Image (cartoon, rainbow, N blue to C red):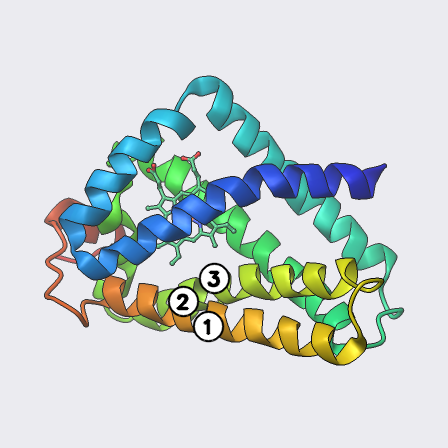
């Protein structure tokens, strides 16, 4: 039952994440493109019913994920079984921080939590040493988690070599896309000038 709910809530969060990550990839084309897309996507996920459902799913996913890690502690044998726990653990840590800081930024600092909000941490030293790996591994962890699901769910249809290679291919694709996103937010493709109110949240000027 808990497994079923975990998968159901993963589908809901997953459909948000597919569009959310596509949104971040659009940053390669420029900040305006990123912000314009986010503003139209917000019309859907900022609907109170949708947002409350999404946030409940996030909380449930973190709780049930931690429970699964503890329940199967020491029983995981192969790379994908272990990777499922490691990527799930990282996603729990990331989601708690990420969603918490977005809600905090909105409620307490009264900020528009857009491109600049996410990029600010990368542009105020020394916070880039935290935020670059923090975002990079979040996107990799999503793809690693997906790779584990692929490895597990195709166990009756595909042979072990195909499942293993398919799993690694998903992770490599994720690392590549993640690198593109982080490079865009870091200002590698064009200069990124963070407005003062966003830098101020890190004590920057
Ligand atoms: C490079 C990686 C990422 C960046 C730069 C990023 C940035 C952002 C930003 C700016 C927001 C605020 C959106 C708004 O104000 O409407 C947000 C919200 C959110 N992000 Fe991410 N995100 C990243 C990766 C992820 C990942 C991997 C996940 C899931 C594991 C995730 C889950 C969420 C959720 C659930 C919200 C809250 C939506 C809401 O209710 O407003 N994000 N993110």
Quote the CA–CA distance across marks 1 and 3.
7 Å
Disc 3 to disc 2, how far (Cα)? Answer: 6 Å
Residue drawn at the location 40% of the way across and 67% of the way down: 177
SS for callout 2: helix
Q: Residue at x 71, y 76 (%)?
A: 162
Q: Quadrant of residue 147?
A: bottom right
Instruction: Tell me which corner region of the image, top left, top right, bottom left or bottom right, holds residue 53.
Output: top right
Question: Circle 3 — which element?
Answer: helix
Quarter of the figure with the C terminus? bottom left
In this rendering, would 138 be left or right of 42? right
Q: Where residue 123 is drawn, which disc sits there?
A: none
Question: x, y percentage for residue 18?
Answer: 46, 48
Q: Contact (CB < 8 A) between labels 1 and 2?
A: yes
Q: Is residue 6 left or right of residue 95?
A: right
- Does any portion of residue 127 appear in the rendered image? no
**Residue hosting label 2:** 178
- Residue for badge 1: 175
Q: Nearer the viewer, residue 204 or 72?
A: 72
Instruction: Identify which residue is drawn at 85% across, 64% down.
Output: 73
Quadrant of the image for the N terminus? Answer: top right
Q: Are marks 3 and 2 in contact (CB under 8 Å)?
A: yes
């Amino acid at each position: 039952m808990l497994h079923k709910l975990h998968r159901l809530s993963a589908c809901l969060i997953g459909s948000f994440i597919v569009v959310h990550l596509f949104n971040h990839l659009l940053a390669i084309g420029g900040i305006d493109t990123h912000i314009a897309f986010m503003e139209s996507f917000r019309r859907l996920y900022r609907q109170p019913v949708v947002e409350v459902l999404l946030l409940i799913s996030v909380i449930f996913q973190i709780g049930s994920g931690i429970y699964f890690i503890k329940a199967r502690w020491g029983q995981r044998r192969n790379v994908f079984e272990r990777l499922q726990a490691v990527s799930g653990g990282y996603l729990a840590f990331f989601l708690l921080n990420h969603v918490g800081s977005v809600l905090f930024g909105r409620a307490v600092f009264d900020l528009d939590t857009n491109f600049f909000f996410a990029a600010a941490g990368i542009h105020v030293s020394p916070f880039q040493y935290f935020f670059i790996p923090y975002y990079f591994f979040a996107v990799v962890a999503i793809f690693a988690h997906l790779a584990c699901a692929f490895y597990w769910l195709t166990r009756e249809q595909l042979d072990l070599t195909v499942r293993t290679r398919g799993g690694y291919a998903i992770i490599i694709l994720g690392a590549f896309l993640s690198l593109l996103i982080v490079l865009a937010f870091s200002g590698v493709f064009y200069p990124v000038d963070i407005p003062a109110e966003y830098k101020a949240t890190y004590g920057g000027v």
